[in-house]
Image (cartoon, rainbow, N blue to C red):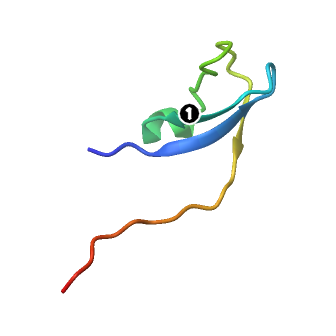
Amino acid sequence: MAMPMYDYQCLDCGKESLIVVTLREHERGDIQCPACGSRNLKQLFTSFIAHTTKKS
């Protein structure tokens, strides 16, 4: 099962990270900064590109 990735910025250390989380973790806000361990994160909203397979 594919898990979604979200961009976050830590409001304590300032590091931006792409974090893979379950939908439940994302909904609860149960996410931790991989750099400093803080839970004081802000989700960043960025554009994305969807890759699809070519159909004949």
Q: How many marks?
A: 1
Residue 25 x/y as whole percent: 49, 32
Query: Compared to 11, does 45 lie above or below?
Result: below
In the image, taking residue 51 as reference, residue 7 lies left or right, namely: right
Query: Compared to 4, does 49 lie above or below?
Result: below
Outermost residue toward the bottom in this view: 56
Query: Compared to 48, does 11 lie above or below?
Result: above
Query: Compared to 56, does 25 lie above or below?
Result: above
In the image, taking residue 49 as reference, residue 15 lies left or right, namely: right
Which quarter of the figure is the N terminus placed in? Answer: top left
Amino acid type of the residue tagged 1 in the rendering = Arg
Q: Residue at x 28, y 71 (%)?
A: 53
Q: Residue at x 69, y 16 (%)?
A: 38
Q: Residue at x 22, y 82 (%)?
A: 55
In the image, taking residue 55 as reference, residue 52 lies left or right, namely: right
- Mark 1, other Cα within 10 Å: few <14 / some 14–19 / many ≥20: few
Residue 23 x/y as whole percent: 45, 42
Q: Relative to the observer, which residue lies in front, 50 or 11?
A: 50
Outermost residue toward the top in this view: 36
Residue 51 x/y as whole percent: 39, 66
In the image, taking residue 27 as reference, residue 46 lies left or right, namely: right
Residue 7 x/y as whole percent: 62, 42
At numbered mark 1, what does the secondary structure look like: helix, strand or loop? Answer: helix
Outermost residue toward the left in this view: 56
Q: Residue at x 45, y 37 (%)?
A: 24
The residue to which callout 1 is attached is 28
Which quarter of the figure is the C terminus placed in? Answer: bottom left
